[in-house]
Image: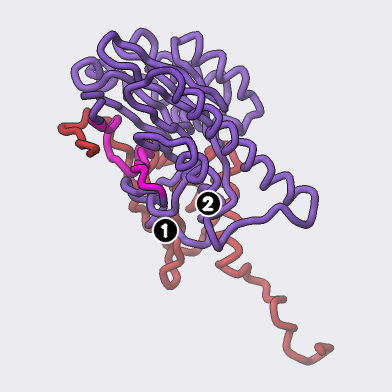
Chain colours: A red, B purple
Amino acid sequence: MSGPGTQPAPGTGSTPNLDYVVAHLTDHLAAGPLGELGVRIEIRGEAILLTGTVPSAQCRDDILRTARAELLGHPVHCDIVVADNATPDHAEEVE
Amino acid sequence: MIRIAAVGDIHMGPESQGVLRPSFETLHESADVLLLAGDLTRHGTPEEAQVVAREIKDLAVPVVAVLGNHDHHADCAEEVTAVLQDAGARVLEGQATVVDNGRARIGVAGTKGFGGGFVGRCAGEFGEPVMKEFVRYSRHRADTLRASLEELREQDCDVRVALTHFSPVPDTLAGEPPEIYPFLGSYLLAEAIDTAGADLAVHGHAHLGTEHGMTSGGVKVRNVAQPVIGRAFHVYHLAG
């Protein structure tokens, strides 16, 4: 039980828990205008790592901008790659 | 030999117009048909479908497609389907089609499929209405896949291919977090494939997964999500 002069109850800190911030960012990327479900967002110490493959450089830039806006105060490392649209150089023989 | 080209999860939007067309224009050199395994758009709008339509219109090989969950997001799946059909694609949902190029008859049975999970780790038709509906929806998609493959068995096909967006097996999900497997596929699809028989099963959806898998019945499964195959498409050679 908490009261005047005691420590705040667990969970009542003023700083949002990073876990939840990352979860909300994941939701926003999926359900928001980006419609992006293919990016993995991992907590690495105080930093955040974004990985995955997206269809365009613009998409990658939009994701990074959104992540940095929602993760203020945390370094955001981006290792998102753009899909390779090259013609394949071989086929698989399916026996 | 029958040559199947396939890709899924191309997630096209206005900014990606034209990026696949140069590779698709080479398809006549390497493939007899192009299969699109869903998530062709980012949000499932008719405008995004028009982008896809311009990538595939008047290609030298037939195009057979299923939609994915992204293609349903804007609740315009019928319009998206119509746009792709206008561009010449055969868009399947619980249906079958035969591509006959004069040398071979390639049967394709297609459905988006749905989730639910895999044997021992799957959702059951129990409890709240929304949970029961989830499982029933997945079961219905699988039932139509089985019926479509059985229909093709009567049509003198040289090969039969099952085309889905969601995965029929966990093998091709390796690399994804195991906790989300129930949202990535369902064993019901594999059971349908093994019951009706197929020469190959192709799916997308799992961007972090792996390309190769197999059903319990021995049907080879390929995850052709573009982030997995790392190319505009992959080509599979089947003995006809």
Q: Residue at x 44, y 10 (%)?
A: B88
The stretch in magenta equals B217-237
Left or right, residue B162 beside residue B1: right
- x, y percentage for residue B223? 37, 42
- The verdict on residue B179 being magenta is no
Is residue B43 visible in this depiction of the protein?
no
Q: Quadrant of residue A44?
A: bottom left
- x, y percentage for residue A55? 39, 35
Q: Residues within 10 Å of mark 2 (few under 14, many from 20)?
A: few
Q: Which sits in the foreground, A79 or A4? A: A79
Tell me the element at label 1. Answer: strand
Question: What residue sits right under mark 2 in the picture?
Answer: A69
Tell me the element at label 2. Answer: helix
Q: Residue at x 56, y 67 (%)?
A: A18
- x, y percentage for residue B197? 43, 36
Q: Quadrant of residue B136?
A: top right
Q: Which mark is residue A76?
A: 1
